[in-house]
Image: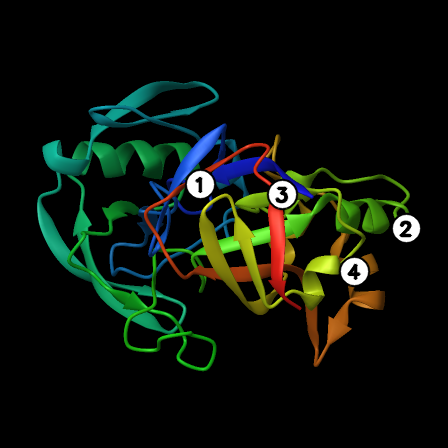
């Protein structure tokens, strides 16, 4: 079994970026979901409410970000050490409330115009430690996460998607599920039974199945909802306690290493 895809999603719910390698950090892969869109009061939103978010591309460079969208001029955004953020504000991601840095008016107007939805871009400072749900954390007072829904990493096996697609009239691509890691060479849903794995030099705890939502019905190339699939079919055979499960959430035991396409996956505990 090897890693066949590595993906990051720098701005939560916008387009992802496929990588050949990535640095594993405590709160997720480097640059993954370190930025997010909220309403002016700091409440997050995603493709669940605004499917058009899928059409906005993101590039990470030495100065920060460049975002682009159909029929809009690209917007360079200074971030990181050169950040143009102007103030901090409390923001809400599901049940979490944490400090974030707000970008200036021209950045927020670009997103608001493109999405036709009043919003602002925020960044997660290094000083913000958003804790993982203690019920699933390995070290409850230490395990942190970015602006991802709840966990630093998401892993899905190619075999699991193949099993789902064999049940669909029209197959769906892996990007409907927005994983960080895709595994080649495993049986369908083998990842459900893993407890601890090693990818390259990094050990990961497999802590919780991923509950899926309506975002899986959004065509990631058009930003439009495409009926009820694959959620309808998944709910018929991957339903547990009223939640539709697909993929596994991970926490890194020893962040700081680099993971690469082609890295072998070793099952340490199952």
Give the side of residue 123 with respect to residue 204, left or right: left
The reply, left or right, for residue 185 in relation to residue 93 is right
Q: Is residue 48 visible to the viewer in this orientation of the structure?
A: no
Q: Is residue 81 visible?
A: yes
Q: Earlier in the sequence, mark 1 or mark 2?
A: 1
Foreground residue among 20 and 244: 20
Question: Disc 2, disc 3: CB below 8 Å?
Answer: no
Asked if disc 4 and disc 3 are in contact, CB closer than 8 Å, the reply is no
Q: Which residue is mark 2?
A: 167
Task: Categorize mark 3 by other alpha carbons within 10 Å: few (<14), some (14-19), many (20+).
Answer: many
Assess disc 4: are there few (<14), some (14-19) or many (≥20) residues with their C-alpha within 10 Å of its C-alpha: some
- Mark 4 or mark 3: which comes first in sequence? 3
How far apart are the two marked residues, 4 and 3, measured between alpha carbons?
19 Å
Q: Secondary structure at mark 2?
A: loop
Relative side of 107 to 247, left or right: left
Label 1 to label 4, Cα distance in Å? 24 Å
Tell me the distance, in whole angstroms, between the alpha carbons under discs 2 and 3.
20 Å
Query: What element does badge 1 sit on?
Result: loop
Say which quarter of the image contains residue 195. Answer: bottom right
Q: Quadrant of the C terminus?
A: bottom right
Label 1 close to label 2 by CB (< 8 Å): no
Q: Which residue is mark 1?
A: 9
List the residue tagged with mark 3. Answer: 182
User: Badge 4 is on which residue?
Assistant: 234
Q: Alpha-carbon distance for marks 1 and 2?
A: 28 Å
Distance between the alpha carbons at the discs numbered 3 and 1: 14 Å
């Amino acid at each position: 079994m090897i890693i066949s895809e590595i993906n990051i999603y720098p701005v939560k719910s916008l387009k992802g970026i496929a990588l050949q390698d990535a640095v594993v950090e405590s709160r997720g892969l480097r640059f993954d979901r370190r930025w997010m869109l909220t309403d002016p009061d700091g409440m997050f939103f995603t493709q669940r409410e605004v499917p058009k978010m899928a059409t906005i591309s993101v590039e990470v460079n030495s100065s920060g970000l460049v975002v682009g969208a159909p029929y809009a001029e690209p917007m360079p955004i200074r971030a990181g050490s050169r950040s143009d953020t102007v103030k901090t504000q409390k923001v809400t991601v599901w049940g979490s409330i944490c400090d974030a840095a707000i970008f200036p008016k021209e950045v927020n107007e670009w997103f608001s115009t493109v999405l036709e939805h009043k919003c602002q871009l925020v960044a997660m400072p290094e000083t913000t430690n958003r804790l993982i749900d203690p019920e699933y954390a390995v070290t409850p007072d230490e395990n942190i996460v970015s602006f991802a829904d709840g966990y630093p990493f998401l892993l899905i096996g190619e075999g699991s998607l193949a099993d789902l697609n064999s049940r669909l009239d029209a197959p769906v691509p892996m990007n409907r599920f927005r994983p960080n890691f895709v595994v080649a060479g495993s049986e369908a849903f083998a990842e459900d039974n893993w407890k601890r794995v090693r990818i390259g030099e990094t050990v990961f705890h497999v802590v919780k199945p991923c509950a899926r939502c309506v975002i899986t019905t959004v065509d990631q190339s058009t930003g439009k909802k495409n009926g009820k699939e694959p959620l309808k079919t998944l709910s018929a055979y991957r339903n547990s306690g009223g939640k539709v499960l697909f993929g596994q959430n991970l926490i890194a035991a020893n962040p700081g290493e680099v993971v690469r396409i082609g890295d072998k996956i070793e099952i340490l505990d199952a």
